[in-house]
Amino acid sequence: MQSLRFKAIDNLTSAKDEVTVNSPAKITAIFGENVFTLQAAREHLSDDAFKSLNSSIKSGQKIDRSLANQVAAGMRHWAQSKGVTHYTHWFQPLTGTSAEKHDSFFTLKSDGSPIEEFDGNALTQQEPDASSFPSGGIRATFEARGYTAWDPTSPAFIMNIGQGHTLCIPTIFVSYTGECLDYKAPLLKSIEALNKAAVDVCHFFDKNVGKVTATLGWEQEYFVIDEGLANARPDIIMTGRTVFGHSPAKGQQLEDHYFGSIPERVYAFMRDFEHESYKLGIPLRTRHNEVAPAQFECAPIFEELNLAVDHNTLLMDVMARVAKRHRLRVLLHEKPFAGINGSGKHNNWSMATDTGVNLLAPGKTPKTNFMFLAFFVNTIKAVHDHADLLRAAIASAGNDHRLGANEAPPAIISAYIGRYLSKVLDAVESRVGDKFDEQDEVMLKLDIHKNIPELLLDNTDRNRTSPFAFTGNKFEFRHHG
Ligand SMILES: [Mg+2]
């Protein structure tokens, strides 16, 4: 093992084979080119099929079987124009990763002649063997039947792996008896429950609201290490984390890594996986060094919740594949190393109406913004009532190892809303509203050269220790790993 490490370091100092990354001049030129977007659907579908798909996405109406055949044919037409030979239902079983089983468009007619085919049945439903996927113990091991069913609200996409191109159809995964066997089906149920409840509440304030969706901006932290060094560690190969060994002499004591300049080799890796992500419609925006040595982070623009979760799941797969091209290994484990920070996956969460209102945006006069106050107060009440569920949702061996071990949020759920909004709520409670001064914009006076602009102060400081903190126009759930 020792000689493997020396060899890996030798290779590192002599290796000059940097991977060329073909980043486009403009991200907009390639963004979503491998996604069956509504624009692609418009081009490849009949009017009826397009309308049916569109209303299924926008208002949850079922697509009938004959139109599903047309949608499938259009999707195949689009995919084949991009060199696709196979399709798969892409789903998220309880393994923490995505699953896929490829089938070819190629089939034989009854007279033995070969054709390419993809019909509505193949698009909407498949039956993978469910017995080899975890069910959390709700099924006997001999109960094997499971179904994947198309989720039209998350668009199909093409995954390119080397020279192979596969059409991936996002699906839910349920058992023969209807139990959810994945993460997507419960998520879709919760999105619908929230929509139903929130629209009713919105109608007290605005009758024009027809739909409320949850929005999510996730953050993905990760470590990057050299493949040669990773291969010298059986613990990293087997578990994606270290389980023995010495701490290095220099960890994060000097706090010089956070937002430091990005090492060139990692920078090439970042640009490469960002490039692949853009083609898949993942709207990555931010990249930076994280606190621990060799730790980094990326984050996208906010999206509708279901799509954001699919994109995060897809991104982790893309990162692992692209890392190999760069002879790197990406570690997505919550706590790969003792004594330094682990990797969190913060959820920046809010709700938005189809009329374009962010329900957690206080606006300039929160005290009289009753729709905001109703959702704000009820979110806090929900956290108070269901703290156990929130805690259970993030309690895993890996994540509990992270929390409280060099990580800010403690394992106890609480909400932080900041001094200003606390004062607003106190004023509402004690009915001193009329005397309460709405806060005007507060500028931070800096006694330095006048070329430095004045800073506009947010109405809350960032509170790093709160697991569920209000951050201006959303809550940030910081427990997730
Ligand atoms: Mg971070």
Image (cartoon, rainbow, N blue to C red):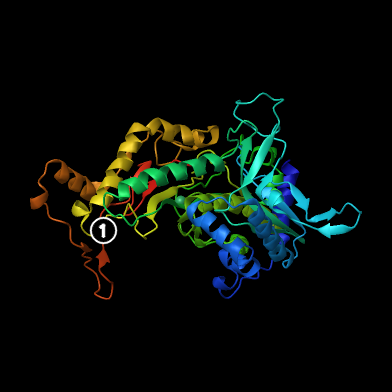
Q: Residue at x 60, y 70 (%)?
A: 30
Near mark 1 (Cα within 10 A), the count class, few <14, some 14-19 or many ≥20, is: few
Q: Position of residue 388 (x, y in %)?
A: 40, 30
Q: Position of residue 186 (x, y in %)?
A: 52, 39
Tag 1, which secondary structure? loop
Q: Nearer the viewer, residue 172 or 30?
A: 172
In which quadrant of the rendered view does residue 98 lie? top right
Q: Is residue 239 above or below residue 166?
A: above
Pick the quarter of the image with the N terminus.
top right
Q: Is residue 81 above or below residue 367?
A: below
Q: Nearer the viewer, residue 113 or 257?
A: 113
In which quadrant of the rendered view does residue 270 lie? bottom right
Q: Which residue is mark 1?
A: 363
Q: Amino acid at mark 1?
A: Gly
Q: Position of residue 335 (x, y in %)?
A: 54, 40
Q: Residue at x 25, y 73 (%)?
A: 449
All told, the count of numbered labels is 1
Q: Is residue 79 above or below residue 333?
A: below
Q: Is residue 18 visible?
A: no
Q: Position of residue 22 (x, y in %)?
A: 65, 70
Q: Which residue is at the far top?
A: 140
Q: Which residue is at the far right?
A: 112
Q: Is residue 409 visible?
A: yes
Judge from the rendering whether residue 40 lies leftward or rightward of residue 360; answer left or right: right
